[in-house]
Image (spheres, grey):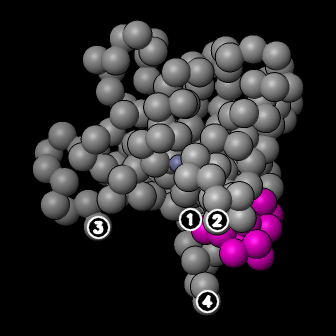
Amino acid sequence: MNADKGPDIPDLSIPASVTEADLRHMRKCIELALRARASGDYPVGALVTRDGHVLGSGIESTHRLLDVAAHAEIEALRSACRGTGTLDLTGATIYTTVEPCYLCSFAIRQLGIARVVIGRPYPQAGGASSHHPILRDSGLTCWGPPPVIVTGVLLEECNALFDSR
Ligand SMILES: [Zn+2]
């Protein structure tokens, strides 16, 4: 899948340092993704956590709300910002069933998210594995250091969300 990416794009398909909490949070994202799918949206769910606490959750809602920005990750980030009363999510982790797109990657970087845990890669327009890897760009110093990225967590389950659509 990554054969045409060139030498500067690392293979992100191998999960590294995945914890039990990561698996638990990704399973919750899959539950949220199923709710999105039941509402006629793409099956994406997202969760924001920090220090073991869930700060926010999101369900892909673009079709249901006719809102081009209502991606699961954006919804989770909005929820976390409202819950904490800040636009600073430094040190937080975001979990998502699908690699964040450019829109969501911008928000993730701007809010200072420290770790991004991904199920299914999105090489066409994802912020980690595409040709515009916003999530990994260390030159965007205005946003601080890039987050740690873990891809492929519960990959088969996340892929299966797209079956029989
Ligand atoms: Zn997105």
Q: Quadrant of residue 31?
A: bottom right
Residue 30 in sight from this viewpoint? no
Residue to which mark 2 is pinned:
63
Q: Nearer the viewer, mark 4 or mark 3?
A: 4
Q: Nearer the viewer, residue 136 or 58?
A: 58
Q: Secondary structure at mark 3?
A: loop
Which residue is painted at 77% across and 30% down in the image?
80
**Can residue 122 be found in the magenta stretch?**
no
Q: CA distance from mark 2 to mark 1?
A: 24 Å
What's the amino acid at mark 4? Ser
Which residue is painted at 62% across and 53% down in the image?
67
**Could you tell whether 1 is left or right of 49 in the image?**
left
Q: CA distance from mark 4 to mark 1?
A: 17 Å
- Contact check, label 2 and label 3, Cβ < 8 Å: no
Q: Position of residue 148 (x, y in %)?
A: 50, 30
Q: Secondary structure at mark 4?
A: loop
The numbered dot on residue 164 is 4
